[in-house]
Image (cartoon, rainbow, N blue to C red):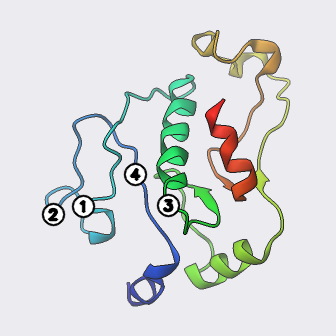
């Protein structure tokens, strides 16, 4: 926790949670999450286009702060393998964005509920984790 307190000026946290859920002393032990929730949230279902809408809400909120230089999306199940300082320096020194996306040959992974937002011929499998440079973060508007 001490390292995070030292590095708190180097990151911003934006949380999209289920509508009505509030991060406070009764729901989390980490004060880093207090007051970080988006004012607008939507019900998200895994494998549906609502995940994309929630990600766009998060990016939109992060873009409002001109101090944000990189945009890293993590899910609640992400556990970093390195400490914050290592990851921060790696991400900030990289001239690239990181997006995991590939054509998955398993037809069963496509959820028809993603249509029409994501047509089956445009769908790609990817992780929920990405790192974007500011240039690409504005793509959230389409």
Residue at which label 3 appears = 65
Which corner quadrant of the image does residue 2 belong to? bottom left
Residue 77 visible in image: no
| Tags 1 and 2 touching, CB below 8 Å | yes
Alpha-carbon span between mark 3 and mark 1: 25 Å
Q: Secondary structure at mark 2?
A: loop
The circle drawn on residue 25 is 2
Which corner quadrant of the image does residue 105 belong to? top right
Alpha-carbon span between mark 2 and mark 4: 16 Å
Badge 2: how crowded within 10 Å, few (<14), some, or many (20+)?
few
**Image location (x, y in percent) of residue 106:** 80, 22
Badge 1: how crowded within 10 Å, few (<14), some, or many (20+)?
few
Alpha-carbon span between mark 4 and mark 3: 15 Å
The circle drawn on residue 15 is 4
Asked if residue 26 lies left or right of residue 19, the reply is left
Residue at which label 1 appears = 28
**Sequence order check: which comes first, mark 2 or mark 4?**
4
């Amino acid at each position: 926790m001490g390292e995070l307190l030292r590095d708190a000026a180097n990151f911003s946290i934006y949380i999209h949670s289920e509508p009505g859920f509030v991060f406070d002393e009764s729901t989390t032990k980490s004060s880093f999450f207090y007051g970080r929730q988006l004012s607008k949230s939507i019900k998200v279902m895994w494998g549906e286009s609502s995940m994309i809408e929630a990600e766009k809400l998060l990016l939109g909120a992060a873009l409002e702060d001109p101090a944000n230089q990189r945009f890293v999306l993590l899910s609640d199940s992400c556990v970093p393998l390195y400490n914050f300082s290592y990851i921060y320096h790696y991400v900030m020194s990289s001239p690239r964005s990181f997006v995991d996306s590939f054509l998955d040959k398993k037809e069963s992974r496509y959820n028809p509920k993603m249509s029409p937002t994501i047509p089956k011929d445009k769908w790609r499998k990817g992780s929920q984790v990405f790192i974007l440079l500011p240039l690409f973060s504005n793509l959230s508007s389409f």
